[in-house]
Image (cartoon, coloured by chain):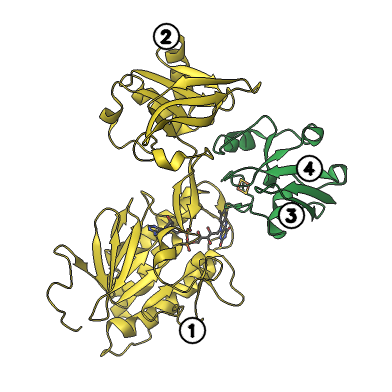
Amino acid sequence: MNSMAPGDLPPSRTETDVIIIGAGPIGLFAVFELGLLDLKCHLIDILDRPGGQCTELYPEKPIYDIPGVPVVTGQELTDRLMQQIRPFGAQFHFSEMANRLHRLEDGRWQLSTDAGTVLVAPVIVVAAGGGSFVPKRPPIAGIEEYEGKSVFYAVRRMEQFRGRDVLIAGGGDSALDWTLNLAPVANRLTLVHHRDGFRAAQHSVNRMRELVGEGRVNFHVANVKALHGANGQLEAVTLTGPDKKEWRQEANAFLPFFGLTIKLGPIAEFGLNLHENLIPVDTAKFESSTPGIFAIGDINGYPGKLKLILSGFHEAALMAQAAFHICRPNEKLRFQYTTSSSNLQKKLGVA
Amino acid sequence: MKIIATDRKGVVHEVEGTLGWTVMEALRDAGLPVAAECGGACACATCHVYVDEEWFGKLNPPSPEELDMLDMAVAVESNSRLSCQIRCEPALDGITVTIAPE
Ligand SMILES: Cc1cc2nc3c(=O)[nH]c(=O)nc-3n(C[C@H](O)[C@H](O)[C@H](O)COP(=O)(O)OP(=O)(O)OC[C@H]3O[C@@H](n4cnc5c(N)ncnc54)[C@H](O)[C@@H]3O)c2cc1C
Ligand code: FES
């Protein structure tokens, strides 16, 4: 690798062979294929755990079309991939958004995350699926202005809500868990949901109803229709009930919990060629039109593409061969089978 | 069968639904903005529609799974349904829906 001008890199950066954006099934399997070729990987995912769509959308649903595995759930497939790649010691950066990519003078790529992680590598593998999983934003006019100041999609510090009039919207586990956790901290806690029924765990629902009985939590069947306040500081909301009745309620913190949705996100700003939110690739290397940047899994597009896990696995294998030549330009790549190569078996820790 | 769908800009579209397929598939295949992230597995709530009152009562009632998933949709109203859980059948010819906000 070339040496680089001092000052080219920020003080705390990590150098590696391959940076993989997305720890869905395809990003995970890429670690395996790259690992067999002795390439080290770092993975970044905005989710707090591996598996992408498999664990976020269908952890308990069965998959029947993984070759040689008649049935496996989304969670089980993820667990097995994690087991399969363990020998390669990939580094995971969870709950981080890959949000800036640029080319260094020496030709390598520098990728930074919203949490301040800075990685440098000659190869980037975009395995970002349909994009990043981000919280669903309720369709309330002007809500953006309040986000991060008085509207929050996650609780990082409970203390932040001490003494505030907190409004929580939603009927899933997050809505209920935070209702229970924040009730003792908030000045007043109000939960609103579109029905008097919840998908959350029954014991949380029971506990919430007890708190309502004791007058420590307010619950309304309602939707939030409008926000009132200034400079991002919420003062009150307009709620509408089932009979279209509207009323105003004071609140200076609003926590909507409607789960996650998929948005393409920062990848759109990476300067890559995109066609209908997909990265066009060649089908020999699965490289994008930018040399050194590969795209595999649901995020890529090519004639005949099928958004299937098995297709992504194949793409990962071919990508790894091409990535090797970029990372180790002076080395010869030897094609070997895991069945018969003691060299590969050593890497896998089985020989 | 016909599906009359109003998009988020208020434009009305007439979409052909294939019997036995779902309303979500008809809307998505017609290029209407239904994300349907989970592909109809009742696991994402991004195929949320409002069904005109006239038609709402003609639908099979939602399954417990659909009711649970609707809890993850935003702006749910009394006539909300997940379009991937509505199957196209002759009795629904002309069903009128509005695509819910994202
Ligand atoms: C309900 C359902 C059932 C399915 N059933 C099957 C089946 O039976 N068989 C089959 O083959 N396929 C099935 N699929 C499709 C399969 O799940 C996908 O093809 C597969 O998940 C694609 O994997 P991926 O790794 O490319 O992307 P994903 O699984 O989408 O993972 C991408 C990851 O990248 C992360 N990410 C994106 N951008 C960023 C960023 N900028 N910073 C940080 N993180 C980022 C995302 O958060 C996500 O975790 C199903 C899908 C669904 C929804
Ligand atoms: S398409 Fe996901 S719930 Fe209907």
Task: Single out the mark in the foreground, 3 or 4.
Answer: 4
Whole-number angstrom distance, CA of label 4 to CA of label 2: 44 Å
Look at chain A in the picture and name its colour.
yellow
- At a point 87% along the width and 46% down the height, the residue shown is B90
Q: Which chain is tinted green?
A: B
Picture quarter with the N terminus of chain A? bottom left
Q: Is residue A291 above or below residue A301?
A: below
Label 1 SS: loop
Whole-number angstrom distance, CA of label 1 to CA of label 3: 35 Å
**Can you identify the residue that label 1 sits on?**
A284
**Can you identify the residue that label 3 sits on?**
B26
Chain where mark 3 sits: B
Q: Is residue A250 left or right of residue B81?
A: left
Viewer-proximal residue among A344 and A305: A305
**Can you identify the residue that label 4 sits on?**
B96
- At a point 35% along the width and 55% down the height, the residue shown is A97
Horizontal and vertical percent position of residue B87: 76, 46
Viewer-proximal residue among A22 and A12: A12
- Labels 2 and 1 share a subunit: yes
Q: Is residue A306 above or below residue B83?
A: below
